Image (cartoon, rainbow, N blue to C red):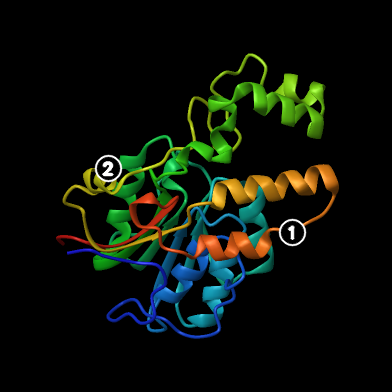
Amino acid sequence: MVKNKSVPRKESNNIGMTGGNPFKNDPRFRLELSYNLVSPKTRSFLDYGCSDGKLLIALKKKIPKAKIYGFDVDAEKTRYIKRNFPGIKIVASSHKSRLILKNSTQEVVALLDVLEHVPDEKMVLSDIYRVLKPGGVLILSVPHKGLTEIFDAGNVKFRFPGLHRFLYERVFGKKDYVKNYLGKELVGDVTWQESMWHKHYSLTELKKLFRTKFKIEKVYYFGLFFPLLSMLDQAIEWFFKKKNLLGKMVIADSRTNYGNLSFSILIIARKAGR
């Protein structure tokens, strides 16, 4: 049976919590949670979709003897990591590339709010399965099909096109809107590829994607008003030039477990088979 929790206190085996988490005040709760879940005994870690490498940089201090790898499609961000953090190895920088890693070499792989952006979910999960060691751990987070899914900022353009245009033109101008959106009906605000919404998943859908490759051990639900609070906070910043007025509310909400109603879901799964 999978347990549903908001904030884990202690874990065993390959995953576990230590103090001094650098993401305690980051609205992206998945980073704090993932940092806690990586055991100090971990010897190899891959962040698939590492962005600017904040999680990798933090983990390099927590597990200094481990081999740390990152993958991202943003070449500018991976160049930044290579230039400033030589202890972190970038293994590829194209969504069409498979990981430049040998089979069964990684103890833990993080896939944090990335799966909903990729063109081929099965290919990505298959490649992660390939590089994980037998019994290796996958930490996966995605937007959840919860109560407030409809307010996902990445899909405002699709669900409320008139409102999206009204707000966008007042912040960035009509010329920018015409250039980036007019005639491009399937281009949203969050995903980098065309013809794709910012996708949300149910636990049942994730189980189907995992098939027999991964065995789910734990599920964490969190956040509910996060999309609404974030949009409101952003609007206040845009129109009134005041930052982070709702910051504490955003952080508090992002760390609360609302069960199946939640906006986000994080799963701990272990590689099945050999």
Nearest the eye: 143 or 250:
250
* Mark 1 burial class by Cα count in 10 Å: few <14, some 14-19, many 20+: few
Percent position of residue 202, x then y: 32, 45
Nearest the eye: 215 or 227:
227
Residue at 48% over, 62% down: 30
Residue 200: which quarter of the image?
A: top left
Q: Which residue is identified by label 1?
A: 245
In this image, 150 relative to 177: left or right? left
Percent position of residue 17, x then y: 41, 81
Q: Amino acid at mark 1?
A: Leu
Q: Which mark is residue 223?
A: none
| SS for callout 2 | helix
Residue at 23% over, 48% down: 207
Q: Is residue 53 visible?
A: no
Tag 1 near tag 2, CB within 8 Å: no
Q: Amino acid at mark 2?
A: Glu
Residue 101 lies, with reference to residue 196, above or below; the image says below
In this image, 204 relative to 244: left or right? left
Q: Which residue is identified by label 2?
A: 205
Residue at 27% over, 80% down: 13
Residue extending furthest right?
A: 241
Is tag 1's residue or tag 2's residue first in the polypeptide sequence? 2
Percent position of residue 161, x then y: 61, 23
Residue 129 lies, with reference to residue 23, above or below; the image says above
Q: Is residue 142 visible?
A: yes
Q: Mark 1 or 2, which is nearer the eye?
A: 1
* Mark 2 burial class by Cα count in 10 Å: few <14, some 14-19, many 20+: few
Nearest the eye: 189 or 250:
250
Structural distance between the alpha carbons of marks 1 and 2: 36 Å
| SS for callout 1 | loop
Residue 140: which quarter of the image?
A: bottom left
